Image (spheres, rainbow, N blue to C red):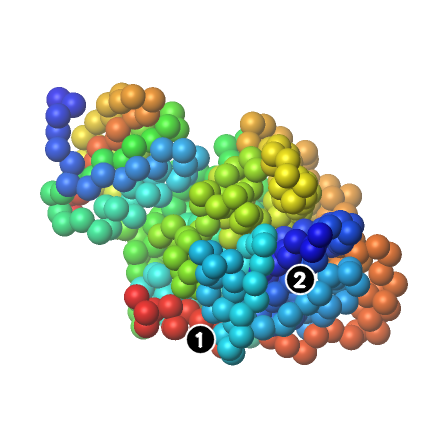
Amino acid sequence: MAKAKVLVLGGGVGGTFVANKLAKHTDIIEVTVVDATGVHHYQPGLLYVPFGWEQPERLRHDERKLLHPAVQLVSAPVRMIDVERRQLFLLNDGTLPYDYLIIATGSCPVPEEVEGLAEGGHHFYTEPAALKLKEALNNFQGGRIVVGIGGFPYKCPPAPIEFTLLLDDWLRQRGLRSKTEITFVTPLPQVFTIPTVVPMIEELFARKGIRVETFFNTEFVDFQKQRVVSLEGTELDYELLVLIPPHRGAPVIDASGIGDKGGWIPTDKFTLQVKGHERLFAIGDATDLPVSKSGAAAHFEAPIVVKNLINLVNGKEPDAKYNGDVMCFVETGEGKATVLRFNYERPPQPPKPSAWYHWLKAIMNRLYPVALPRNIAPDVFIAMLQGKFSKVSPFCGSELMEKLKQDVMKTR
Amino acid sequence: MTEIKADKVVDARGAQCPGPLVELIRAIKEVPVDAIVEVWTQEPRTKEDTKAWCQRSGHEFVGAFPADGYERVLVRKKR
Ligand SMILES: Cc1cc2nc3c(=O)[nH]c(=O)nc-3n(C[C@H](O)[C@H](O)[C@H](O)COP(=O)(O)OP(=O)(O)OC[C@H]3O[C@@H](n4cnc5c(N)ncnc54)[C@H](O)[C@@H]3O)c2cc1C
């Protein structure tokens, strides 16, 4: 019997985890990852780039090296998924047929969704943006910094809070904190989405003199006057604006007509199948699941997708269920961190921030590429020690992404 | 009272907080002044959050009405 062809679209966290786990089943399936750039971008490291605490080049890993040898890799952008004929159309001609498809195309920030934000605001969610913010911080001599959330949804919900706390550290180290007013803005009624985490963050912000402006739904940024205005009528003047833009799913999802209005794929929250398509699965940021868009969620979803897909191939029911598990370490400043662990049923109860969690996060950031379930990967480790990283620009914020976005707009 | 006619209805059933409120605010942005937006929610917090948001933003909280397995929360755009 011919082996079933499984394509994994996207070679980020979700795509790579799922492909490497599928590699154990190559007796019955053929696994190919199709990625736009062939560079695996470790995005959590971007948090440190604006402060000069991480080199952006070190976050670009060669996807081929991270994949199990039994997994094939096609480095080419996909223009469209043809779910009727079960094939992918590549941007530069050619098609790839599949029997099963796993969509792991992630999410990217879209500053253009807020008027004036692209011109007047900074963020650190893509490599080019993080580098631009680094330059702005280096030129910053004190004044008003407005930082926070520019719209929903966005990935890694704690990252803006972490950034704000690290910013406070950085300004103190530079002797600029007494000359700087920090205001954290959020569209929410409280400082964070998850109520059980709110008291801890409120206490940290109060202790560090960080002002909080809740119910701040950014309406527009008047970049000439350096003023940000909310729908609620609040106006804040700034010398530096750091607002995380709302995100969208990948342009290929819009182009294929399989997403909702935000470009997210309607996904069964338990089986992780794309709703209405038995042979399609979605994983990670690309889904519309009610969980934080995070690498951790993608990591916990991977074994469920593998089990259900293999069941289908064997003519069985996809009976494995994702329970919404997410876990992430959250920087709280002063060399400390905490951890959030939660799922669909159970909210997180973060422990008191400590240096221990900070070190765990630091170790994870360093060892992540080795931890991908590829079998032991000494070559990846050696390449890291030698400082050998990919030269290609990561997808989010790249010219390629802009081109794919523009192509979709033209056909709308 | 439950017969108030909304100009725009947003179905946010199944969405977790802050989803329904975010959807409501997005819809308020799009409608003209005096229009009523109605959001369908299964989150018990939406009603109180919406009230608080209306107080802050100067829009009118019209009311929250139980429906079949969800709640209809109505807001009139005031400015
Ligand atoms: C600043 C920052 C801090 C973060 N911190 C954390 C953290 O502490 N913990 C945590 O768990 N998560 C964190 N995250 C979030 C995490 O990085 C993402 O949630 C995770 O990468 C999602 O994985 P994914 O596989 O869904 O998508 P991605 O990893 O983004 O991968 C998507 C892939 O799809 C490919 N692709 C897209 N379109 C196409 C196409 N048309 N054709 C071919 N390929 C395509 C891209 O090239 C890319 O490789 C952070 C993110 C940021 C930005």
Look at label 1 and name its amino acid.
Lys
Q: Would you say B63 lies left or right of A249 here?
A: left
Is ligand 1 closer than 8 angstroms to the Cβ of mark 2? no
Camera-side residue of B58 and B1: B1
Badge 1 crowding class, 10 Å Cα cut-off, few under 14, some 14 to 19, many 20 or more, is few
**Residue on which the image places disc 1:** A403
Camera-side residue of A100 and A119: A100
Above or below, A346 against A411 in this view is above
Query: Whole-percent x and y of residue A168?
Result: 58, 55
Q: Residue at x 74, y 73 (%)?
A: A389
Badge 2 crowding class, 10 Å Cα cut-off, few under 14, some 14 to 19, many 20 or more, is many
Looking at the image, tell me whether mark 1 or mark 2 is earlier in sequence order.
2
Above or below, A150 against A89 in this view is above
Q: Residue at x 56, y 35 (%)?
A: A270
Look at label 2 and name its amino acid.
Thr
Above or below, A28 against A323 in this view is below
**Residue on which the image places disc 2:** A32
Quarter of image, res B7: top left
Looking at the rendered structure, the secondary structure element under dot 1 is helix
